[in-house]
Image: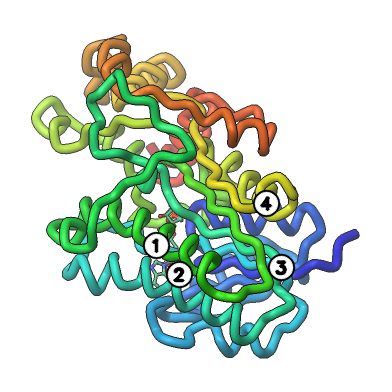
Amino acid sequence: MTTTTVFVSGANGFIAQHTVQQLLQSGYKVIGSVRSAEKGEKLKKVLNSDKFSYVIIPNIADVGAFDKVLKENKDITVFLHIASPFRFNIESTEKDILIPAIEGTRNVLTSIKENAPQITRVVVTSSDAAARENDDKNPNLTLDENSWNNATYDEAKKDPVSAYLGSKGLAEKLAWNFVKTEKVNFKLATVLPSYTFGPQIADELVLADLNSSSKVFEEILTSTPESVGLYTHNGSFIDVRDAAKAHILAFEKEDAVNKRLLLSSGRFTSQTIRDILVKKFPQLKGKIFEGVPGEDVEEIKQMPKLDYSQTEKVLGIKYRPLEVSSVDAVSQLLRVRGQ
Ligand code: NDP
């Protein structure tokens, strides 16, 4: 039985709640940060484990936000920084996305350096957005663990989507630069999930305002021929349970040190999901916009190729397919929303 205590920032978030649950199942003690007591209590109730506790950190962008918890808990030896803004209904691209993503990462790393020399492993959650070379329709391009999104801060601040995509590359670069230029005791790995799909860990955690990647299913369930153009998604995907497992392997495995771990189970478009839903949920037939079955095949051929074999070698995870993630996410949504 392990005695390691793992700190998880943004513990109530979609990916983090699965990570915390899996950590507890593996015997780790977990301290998570959330933004309010209400969120902490809700999560604590669902997790139902005396090995989980939480602290309240209202804004990761506040200088010194992590100092108190790291000064008071010298048993923490692993830090998973998963919290980052991933919402688009915002007022300011800088205040609401770029600053918390970038300064939050700086605050975590600075606080570990100054207050927690016993921490030996740090995992920062980035995104495949940080490895996107701004050429989404180039089938001759191959993206791998060395690919970078090189958007500048000024380019990123122009609209919410650019801010989110840019924030991930800028925050991840800051983290790698920090370990290169500062004298630190810890080893870093970054995890770069793609669109992350699947269920919440409990029905009680299905929010009215879903996290951005779970919203994809809500949009597909409610879109009409008129609205569908507003919500087209395409890219690559990973199941949330596999993304959570990757965060744990990222600190457990020696081979993961200094690695960017890019997660993809495959390519998809909204049509790929529509085709799965019509097949697996006969009651939705005629009720959702069904599009043109199989239309995704050509679109996927035009996307850049992915070669994440270095990551696959390190992690050795057999990723869940889209059908499993979609069916589990949508079954839960239909159950909770009474459809
Ligand atoms: P969620 O929105 O579910 O979780 C984000 C977490 O970060 C929440 O706990 C949120 O708190 C917290 N948070 C956001 N901004 C702040 C802030 N300023 N101060 C304190 N806490 C904050 O998103 P996901 O679980 O999907 O995302 C988790 C991580 O994974 C992020 O780094 C995201 O960029 C990355 N990622 C996600 C992908 C996906 O498809 N889901 C794909 C690629 C990367 P609260 O709930 O209170 O708002």
On the question of residue 268 being in view, the answer is no
Q: Secondary structure at mark 3?
A: loop
Which disc number belongs to residue 105? 2
Relative to 170, does residue 9 appear above or below in the rendering? below
Give coordinates of residue 229: x percent, y percent: 13, 31
Give, as a three-letter code, the residue at label 4.
Answer: Ile
Q: CA distance from mark 4 to mark 2?
A: 19 Å
Mark 3: give few (<14), some (14-19) or many (20+) Cα within 10 Å. some
Give, as a three-letter code, the residue at label 2.
Answer: Thr
Give, as a three-letter code, the residue at label 1.
Answer: Ala
Which quadrant, please, contains the N terminus? bottom right
Q: Ligand 1 is in which quadrant of the figure? A: bottom left
- Residue shown at 69% from the left, 47% from the top: 249
Question: Pointer 4: what residue?
Answer: 248
Relative horizontal placement of residue 165, taking residue 29 as reference (left or right): left
Q: Earlier in the sequence, mark 4 or mark 1?
A: 1
On the question of residue 232 being in view, the answer is yes
Question: Pointer 3: what residue?
Answer: 120
**Tag 4 near tag 3, CB within 8 Å:** no
Q: Disc 4 vs disc 1: which is toward the camera?
A: 1
Relative to 191, does residue 35 appear above or below in the rendering? below
Specify the quadrant of the image occupied by residue 297.
top left
Which quadrant, please, contains the C terminus? top left
